[in-house]
Image (cartoon, grey):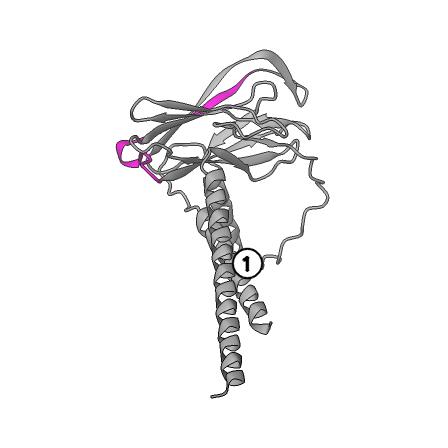
């Protein structure tokens, strides 16, 4: 084997090794970034927060509170949400759930409020959910609690809904700290949302398909009506809460992004 051949083989070996090292570093960085994304999602989702189904001023909305258990030694036994008094809801109902008893408490308002021409002096002040022994939230568990409220205040109003989370060891965590623009997130931010402009009552989408005439159609309509009534009912009758796949979806998306970034970098390095 000539000296020139030996040098050529060494050069190819060195380049191949460099390409592998570069690709490995790229994939490692991408995987680390994906992991940080997942951790970021998990951290942001660890707080008690509210998800409104609608934010349209003057309308009704289902508000869903996501409550994680953050104690390593105690269970969550009770959750209390305080409703606004400056812009009170004139209608509040609770979605029943298995193993939790819900109670709506009314109270006199600090000052009378006029809603749709009527003077309101008393309104729902708090909603409290209390778990039985078998349904208290343990470590690494969470639960969702839903209420239907209305009417929402004028557009641009921040609706703050402080929540108190009670643990089995007597600890009470108050989620009531307001967030400031440009400031760091508080340790226990208050669940809140901002109302938006009223929806155009004349822009509703048409039904996907017109129901067929006859007894079958009447039966279907009756079933749909019964289902809607059951969903909006206010009681403590047991009902099974739907699972929340937020973490699973966020983690899968972050993992796919990391894998795609690593694969692209590997292809580029091989083409050099």
- Position of residue 103 measured from the top left corner of the image (x, y, whole percent): 41, 25
Where residue 100 sits: x, y (%)?
35, 33
* Image quadrant assignment for residue 60: top right
Residue 132 on the magenta segment: yes
Location of residue 35 in the rendering, given as x and y in whole percent from the top left corner: 46, 50
Q: Residue at x 49, y 59 (%)?
A: 25
Question: How would you rate the neighbour count of disc 1 (Cα within 10 Å): few for under 14, some for 14-19, many for 20 or more?
Answer: few
The span picked out in magenta is 122-140
Q: Nearer the viewer, residue 28 or 198?
A: 28
Q: Residue at x 63, y 34 (%)?
A: 59
In the image, residue 178 sits, relative to residue 68, either above or below, namely above
Left or right position of 72 against 128: left
Q: Determine whether the residue tagged by mark 1 lies in a helix, strand or loop.
A: loop
Quick check: 195 above or below 250? above
Q: Which residue is mark 1?
A: 214
Furthest residue toward left: 133
167 over 99 or under it: above or below: above
Would you say 235 lies left or right of 59 here? left
Q: Is residue 216 visible?
A: no
Where is 87 relative to 108, above or below? below
Q: Is residue 195 left or right of residue 237?
A: right
Q: Say which of 37 and 232 sits in front.
A: 37
Give the residue drawn at x 59%, y 68%: 268
**Quadrant (top left, top right, bottom left, bottom right) of the C terminus:** bottom right
Q: Position of residue 259 (x, y in %)?
A: 50, 61
The answer to whether one can see residue 193 in this image is yes
The residue furthest top is 111
Total of numbered circles in the picture?
A: 1
């Amino acid at each position: 084997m000539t000296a020139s051949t030996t040098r050529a083989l060494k050069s190819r070996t060195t380049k191949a090794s460099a390409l592998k090292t570069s690709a490995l570093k790229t994939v490692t960085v991408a995987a680390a970034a994906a992991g940080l994304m997942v951790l970021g999602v998990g951290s942001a989702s660890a707080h008690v927060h509210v998800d409104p189904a609608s934010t349209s001023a003057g309308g009704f909305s289902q508000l869903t509170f996501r409550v994680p258990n953050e104690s390593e030694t105690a269970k969550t036994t009770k959750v209390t949400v305080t409703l606004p008094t400056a812009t009170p809801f004139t209608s509040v109902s609770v979605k029943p759930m298995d193993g939790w008893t819900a109670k709506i408490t009314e109270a006199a308002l600090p000052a009378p409020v006029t809603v749709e021409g009527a003077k309101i002096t008393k309104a729902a002040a708090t909603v409290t959910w209390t778990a039985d022994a078998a349904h208290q939230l343990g470590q690494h568990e969470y639960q969702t609690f839903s209420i239907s409220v209305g009417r929402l205040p004028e557009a641009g109003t921040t609706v703050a809904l402080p929540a108190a989370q009670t643990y089995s060891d007597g600890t009470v965590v108050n989620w009531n700290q307001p967030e400031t623009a440009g400031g760091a997130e508080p340790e226990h931010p208050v669940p809140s949302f901002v109302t938006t402009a009223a929806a155009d009552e004349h822009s509703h989408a048409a039904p996907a398909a017109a129901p067929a005439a006859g007894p079958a159609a009447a039966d279907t309509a009756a079933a749909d009506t019964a289902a809607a009534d059951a969903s909006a009912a206010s009681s403590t009758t047991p009902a099974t809460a739907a699972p929340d796949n937020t973490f699973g979806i966020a983690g899968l998306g972050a993992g796919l992004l990391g894998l795609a970034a690593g694969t692209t970098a590997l292809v580029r390095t091989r083409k050099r």
